[in-house]
């Protein structure tokens, strides 16, 4: 099997061959078309619920703009600590020489993604939704922090990619949104490949040294982390901005609805299966 270092060499070459300029890649329209959905309707957080069925078409379309704005904000907010953590690992013992070479591209591409999402959000929403995650202080067993970091990377990238792939194939939505999702997926497919290989090697290195208690604690933390990442998709401010009444109640209703639970399980399947296979999750979390 190809090692993470060997894979890094191949990915570095691909990133150099496909090197792109975030300032020339897009023709930003002056405004978005109010007659189009800005986000694939099936991905909208309340899709299929009784509330969704009760909304008229203009309200659904307005909501789709704030939903995609929330999704792009979540991605951007996830990329900030990702870049910080990756840059912290450059030229350290935590990466091989080939790994460091590739991480330069990973960081470059994530920086461009933040610029791209930031441009969209400022231009069409006039804001970026703030981050909600609270960093909890905890003590780590040896290697645990390293494994946890790459798990967090995988959560933001795998969940995001599920949305990217759906939207990059949707001709009915705003063309600029479709294009952003396509551009993001193009880079992310490399990041995901590297992340999966690197996390596998880290897990094989560290997990055998962990006690049963550490393993169980890690699995609990990871399940909670995925759950809290999903909660961020049901942002009350986004509902309020779209003009929905009682935004906290909307969030509560949406999170408790069986159809949205099915969506979360479907969108997380690949991610959860990777963690289960590696033994990082001891059981599939209820999302
Ligand atoms: Fe990204
Ligand atoms: Fe990425």
Image (cartoon, rainbow, N blue to C red):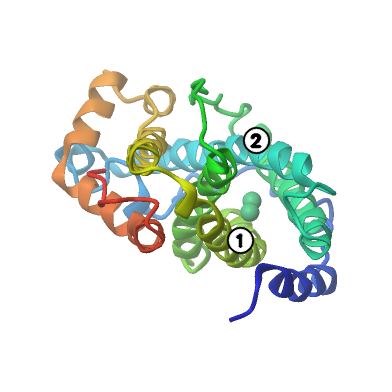
Determine the image quadrant of residue 251. Answer: top left
Name the side, left or right, on which 222 lies relative to 135: left
Place of residue 145 in the rendered image (x, y in percent of width and height, measured from the top left)? 56, 38
Residue 101: tell me if it is visible: yes
Q: Residue, x 41% and y 60% (percent of image)?
A: 278
Q: Which residue is located at x 65 percent, y 43 percent?
A: 117
In the image shown, does 88 or 111 lie closer to the viewer?
88
**Which of disc 1 and disc 2 is earlier in sequence?**
2
Ligand 2, by image quadrant, is bottom right
The N terminus, quarter of image: bottom right
| Structural crowding at the residue carrying mark 2, measured as other residues with C-alpha within 10 Å and reported as few (<14), some (14–19) or many (≥20) | some
**Disc 1 element:** helix
Q: Nearer the viewer, residue 206 or 51?
A: 206
- Identified at 60% across, 29% down, the residue is 128
User: Secondary structure under badge 2?
Assistant: helix
Q: Is residue 202 left or right of residue 112?
A: left
Residue 27 seen in this snapshot: no
Look at 29% across and 20% down and name the residue there.
248
Direction from residue 131 to residue 84 in the image, left or right: right
Residue placed furthest toward the bottom: 1
Judge the density around disc 1: few (<14), some (14-19), many (≥20) Cα neighbours within 10 Å.
Answer: many
Tag shown at residue 134: none
- Residue position marked by numbered label 2 in the rendering: 81
Instruction: Using the image as rendered, state which of residue 246 and residue 104 is in the foreground.
Output: 104
For disc 1, the marked residue is 198
What is the x, y in percent for residue 127?
62, 26
**Can you give x and y, in whole percent of width and height, for residue 204 in the image?**
51, 60
- Residue 244's image quarter? top left
Q: Position of residue 49 (x, y in %)?
A: 18, 42
């Amino acid at each position: 099997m190809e090692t993470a270092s060997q894979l890094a060499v191949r990915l570095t070459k691909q990133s150099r061959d496909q090197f792109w300029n975030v300032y020339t890649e897009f023709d930003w329209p002056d405004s978005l078309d109010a007659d189009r959905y800005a986000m694939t309707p099936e991905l909208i957080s309340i899709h299929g619920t009784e509330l969704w069925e009760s909304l008229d078409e203009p309200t659904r379309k307005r909501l789709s703009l704030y939903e995609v704005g929330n999704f792009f904000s979540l991605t951007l907010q996830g990329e900030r600590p990702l870049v910080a953590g990756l840059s912290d690992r450059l030229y350290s013992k935590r990466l091989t020489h080939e790994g460091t070479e590739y991480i330069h591209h990973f960081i470059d591409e994530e920086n461009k993604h933040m610029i791209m999402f930031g441009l969209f959000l400022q231009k069409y929403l006039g804001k970026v939704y703030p981050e909600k995650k609270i960093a909890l202080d905890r003590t780590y067993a040896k290697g645990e922090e390293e494994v946890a970091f790459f798990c967090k990377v995988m959560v933001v990238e795998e969940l995001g990619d599920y949305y990217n792939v759906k939207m990059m194939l949707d001709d009915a939505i705003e063309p600029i949104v479709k294009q952003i999702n396509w551009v993001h997926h193009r880079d992310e497919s490399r990041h995901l490949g590297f992340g999966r290989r690197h996390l596998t090697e880290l897990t094989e290195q560290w997990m055998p040294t962990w006690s049963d208690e550490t393993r169980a604690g890690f699995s609990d933390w990871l399940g909670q982390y995925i759950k809290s990442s999903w909660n961020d998709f049901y942002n009350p401010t986004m509902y309020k901005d779209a003009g929905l009444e009682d935004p906290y109640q909307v969030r509560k209703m949406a999170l408790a609805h069986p159809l949205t639970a099915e969506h979360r399980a479907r969108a997380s399947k690949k991610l959860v299966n990777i963690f289960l296979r590696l033994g990082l999750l001891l059981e599939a979390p209820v999302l």
